[in-house]
Image (cartoon, rainbow, N blue to C red):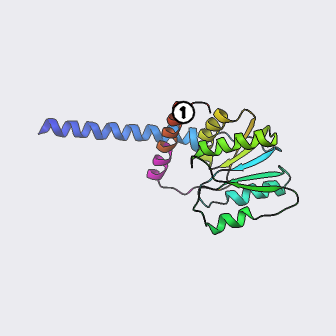
Amino acid sequence: MQRLAILAMSALGAVAVGMAGLGGVGYFLYSKSRVDPMQPVDAIIVLGGDRDGREEYGIELARDGLSSNVVLSNPYWKDDPKMAEFCAVQDPRFTVTCVRPQPRATRGEALFTRDLAAQHGWTSVMVISWRYHLPRARYIFSQCFDGEIVMRPVPRDYDFSVAHWEYIYLYQTFGFVKAFFQGRS
């Protein structure tokens, strides 16, 4: 019985140390990820995710003259009224294109970006997502798109619990591993 208790305590200790290590590395790798300087690009690509202001931000950047093309990823349900509103934006300074990614993941978004870039002659894109998603998105986009990639986070703060941050760091890390094994597209 004592031996089982020692094994259980050792296992719990190992998990705690692993989680602390993941939290420390994740904080610097994901939460403090590199953000590229703002610059004009051929297209602004807004990745799907939370309703956290990302679509408004991408459109605002186009209104500020950073691009004449905004591409909104639309992995949401078919009749999403908010996406319908964003996709209907009309401005003489830029066009808004909404695309359903296949697969409905970052790789699908990188693939439709590659295809649109080839179709329209784009050589540079700005990708908008969560700050903690930027490293993985940069990697996936570099596997699919040969042009210049500018990574910009949605301008917001995140008020997550420690457990939620651990989940995010774990999810992003597993996503990196998956992307590595998927290779170039």
Q: Residue at x 72, y 32 (%)?
A: 146
Q: Which span of residues is magenta-colored? A: 157-169
Residue 161: say if magenta.
yes
Question: Outermost residue, left direction?
Answer: 1
**Where's the N terminus, which quadrant?**
top left
Q: Residue at x 83, y 49 (%)?
A: 66
Badge 1 amino acid: Gln
Nearer to me, 7 or 36 = 36
Q: Position of residue 142 (x, y in %)?
A: 66, 34
**Where's the C terminus, which quadrant?**
top right
Q: Quadrant of residue 114?
A: top right
Tell me if 107 is positioned left or right of 12 in this view: right
Residue topped by disc 1? 182
Q: Residue at x 63, y 43 (%)?
A: 134
Q: Position of residue 26 (x, y in %)?
A: 52, 40
Tell me if 6 is positioned left or right of 93 in this view: left
Magenta highlight: main SS: helix
Residue 21: say if magenta.
no
Give the structural element (helix, strand or loop) at label 1.
Answer: helix
Q: Position of residue 51 (x, y in %)?
A: 61, 61
Give the answer, above or below, for where 4 lies relative to 63.
Answer: above
Question: Outermost residue, right direction?
Answer: 92
Q: Position of residue 137 (x, y in %)?
A: 62, 41
Q: Quadrant of residue 75?
A: bottom right
Nearer to me, 8 or 109 = 109
Q: Residues within 10 Å of mark 1 (few under 14, many from 20)?
A: few
Q: Residue at x 60, y 63 (%)?
A: 78
Give the answer, above or below, for where 77 lies relative to 22.
Answer: below
Tell me if 123 is positioned left or right of 11 in this view: right
